Amino acid sequence: MRLKLLSLLFIILSVATSAIAATFANESLDYKVMYKWGLIHKQAGHATLTLRNQGNRYITQLTAASEKWADRFYMVRDTLNGVIIKNGFLPIFYEKIAREGGEYKRDIIKYTRTGNTVIGDCTRIRQKNKKKPITTDSIILKAQGMTIDMLSAFYYMRSVDYQKMKTGENVSLNVFSGKRKELLKIIYHGVETIEYDERTYQCYHITFTFTSEGKKKTSDDMDAWITIDSRRIPVKLEGKLPVGKIHCLYTGK
């Protein structure tokens, strides 16, 4: 079972019934991606999330890259772009451009909504390597209720009123990837103190899992810690790899 590395950065989610009014100023959030295995604890990558206001919409972007030493094992150069309606944090456009280990992938999702039904018109572009042809296919994804993607999730979760959630309470909602609809369960664990790089944060602790519609796990469980202040910044995210763990740590102030 392979953990999606970038998923650690932007799939902390919750449900609309727990949302509070929230708006975001233009911002840029920086993270370092640390690899830990036994005595090894080394920075393997970095990422930046940006948000810009544009009328009644947010324009968002994630850029992520592996460090030079890690490129020798598995190079990552990814960009995600999104457009989100401010009211309800509903995505209307999502794009993932991934260059990973010599493979090129591009996923595009365009959303339409009718009542409680959400349709995702998905285009998937692939090239195994530079010697292989580029292939294109499409798929229509459909869901009922709150539905988001891997990028809009990062911002939507920051509108959640965690103070109204009880320890051990869990919720579920839909996530569209480029090829399928997944179900996400989030378990709330209460407030914890996180310390690293001589900094201390009071945070909400969440564990979340992904499953297919057949209830089969699509990645390992992950944990996240989100500051309890008005900025609601995810300062630490942790997940397992086949060998070792990945920690994503916020490096801003």
Image (cartoon, rainbow, N blue to C red):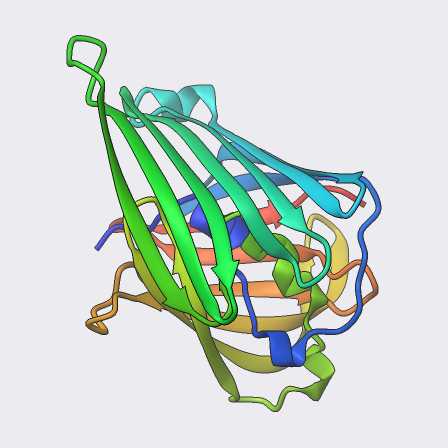
> Which image quarter holds the N terminus?
bottom left
Up the image or down, 86 lies above or below 79; here it is below
Q: Which residue is drawn at 66% across and 73% down?
A: 204
Q: Residue at x 61, y 74 (%)?
A: 16
Residue 222 seen in the current view? no
Coordinates of residue 248 in the picture (x, y in percent): 54, 48
| Identity of the residue furthest to the top in this view | 131
Asked where in the image residue 199 lies, by quadrant, the reply is: bottom right
| Identity of the residue furthest to the left in this view | 132
* Viewer-side residue, 170 vs 60: 60
Coordinates of residue 64 in the picture (x, y in percent): 52, 31
* Viewer-side residue, 220 vs 127: 127
* Viewer-side residue, 248 vs 198: 248
The count of marks equals: 0
Q: Which residue is drawn at 83% across and 64% down?
A: 230
Q: Is residue 210 left or right of residue 173?
A: left
Asked where in the image residue 119 lies, by quadrant, the reply is: bottom left
Residue 62 seen in the current view? yes
Asked where in the image residue 47 lies, by quadrant, the reply is: top right
Coordinates of residue 102 in the picture (x, y in percent): 27, 19
Q: Residue at x 49, y 71 (%)?
A: 116
